[in-house]
Amino acid sequence: MNDVIKYSFLFIILLLIQVVVLNNILFSGYINPLLYILFIIVFPLMRDRGLILVLSFLLGLFVDFFLDSGGINAAATLAIAYLRLPLLKGLLRKSDIDFLVFNITKLPFTKLLSYIAILTFTHHLIVFSLEYFKLSEILTILSRTILTGIFTFILIIFSLLLMNKSK
Amino acid sequence: MQQIISFIIKYKYFILFMLLEVIALNFTVQSHSFHKSKFVNSANVLTGGIYNKIHSFKQYTSLKGHNQLLLEENVRLKNKLSKTLINSIHDTVTVIDSLKYFQKYSYTFANVINNQYHKKHNYLTVNIGSKKGVKPDQGVINSKGIIGITNTTSNNYATVLSILNENSKINVKLLNSLHFGTLIWNGKDYNILQLVDLPIQADIKEGDTIITGGRSTIFPKGIPVGIILDFNKKNNSYKSINIKLFNDMSAIGPVNIITNFDKKEINNLEETVY
């Protein structure tokens, strides 16, 4: 029960931070970090993956509502929510994970970093590919993915540190 | 049958994933291809309400600038008014003629509560909606020039398709000749737009003023747009004419929404022809 309140709180807070603060940053003209994917990164692993898929879809769709961007964020967030488990299995070289004990903050540091980085950059690549939707814009897509991705990555690391400290 | 059920159970997460992904991509394609009847837009109670709250905080920081703009507009309108007074002072006979007072356009005041300019498909949200008579496809301007065209409406909010949107096409003309062109945006710089379809007969120079053409039923003729920044000619036709806007699209506060009373009549007439 405690977890339900905690993660619904996190869902709303991340959405509000994204919409009220981060969408207005426009660093050097167009870089807006997409911190809300932190929700997908910290959400506990469960045997039943249906919940995280539905929640990630809704989170992305809410962001899309605010940005008038169709279903771009929903599609990208859903994709990383689906990729999360196979990615963790691949990183840890395990065929099965003990879902009850598993906690991403207990991961080895380098594996945690690569887990976050891969999810962040996959998400951003999908977002910007769908936004530009043209093969001729491939360089713009890549540069925006990398620049925005670095920002989001740093913010996610800081937020994780803050969240662990407050415990 | 047994096999089908076991297949579904085995791949249920993948099926759920594909289903939601198709829905999301469907919304995306809808927003890219056609800008009408969209389900995902920021003109609803939740998003509009939150943007309104943010706007009421931000408003105070820009009051000075907006006051300045209003003063400038007042001066311009007063100058216009004094000119018409001189013209009509010779009319010594008072004629009450209802045809003389025929009104074609009306303007409604609105505040922009959300403004995008850094994406490829930019939208704005304004704080009035269908309760105040806003409908899709109305022009939105401010004292310095055009902003966009209303897109979707809810009771109290409306979204505006910004001129900084790849789907936006606006009929414009040169101030000093009758040649028409179309104003589009290539998605790069939010202060620079592109003029296309201008015939080679039009003699243009850098610094020429561009105004709205009044060919569509959305914008009246003569609203300022911007000036020609640079252009190049190739194969006896104009390639890439860059227009610098009068407006700063990154800082937009109060706007006017234009209602055209003749719109229905014109559209009905044109439907019978085409």
Image (spheres, coloured by chain):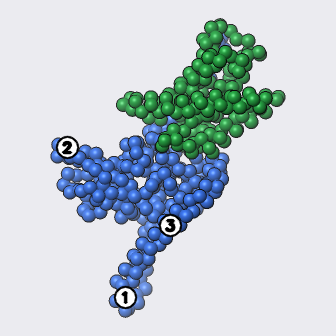
Chain colours: A green, B blue
Q: Looking at the picture, does residue B231 appear above or below residue B269? A: above
The residue at the far left in this view is: B236
Compared to residue B206, the image places residue A89 above or below, namely above
Q: Are marks 2 and 3 in contact (CB under 8 Å)?
A: no
| Quarter holding residue B12 | top right
Mark 2 is on which residue type?
Answer: Lys
SS for dot 3? helix
Q: Is residue B245 left or right of residue A32?
A: left
Q: Is residue B99 above or below residue B240?
A: below
Instruction: Give the farthest residue toward the right.
Output: A1
**Chain under disc 3:** B
Q: How many marks?
A: 3
Badge 3 crowding class, 10 Å Cα cut-off, few under 14, some 14 to 19, many 20 or more, is few
How dense is the environment of label 1, judged by Cα within 10 Å: few (below 14), some, or many (20 and up)? few
Q: Position of residue B203 (x, y in %)?
A: 20, 57
- Which sits in the foreground, A33 or B200? A33
Q: Is residue B21 left or right of residue B264?
A: right
Which kind of residue does numbered mark 1 sit on? Ile
Mark 2–mark 1 Cα distance, whole angstroms, equals 52 Å
**Where is mark 2, residue-wise?**
B234
Going from N to C along the chain, the mark reached first, 2 or 1, is 1
The label on residue B68 is 3
Residue at image position (36%, 31%) is: A136
Mark 2 is surrounded, within 10 Å at the Cα level, by few (under 14), some (14 to 19) or many (20 or more) other residues, namely: few
The residue at the point 41 percent across, 83 percent down is B97
Q: Is residue A83 left or right of residue B267?
A: right
Quarter-wise, where is residue B85 in the image?
bottom left
Q: Nearer the viewer, residue A147 or B85?
A: A147
Residue at image point 29% right, 58% down? B207
Q: Position of residue B259 (x, y in %)?
A: 47, 63
Residue B89: which disc? 1
Please say whether residue B178 is visible from this viewpoint: yes
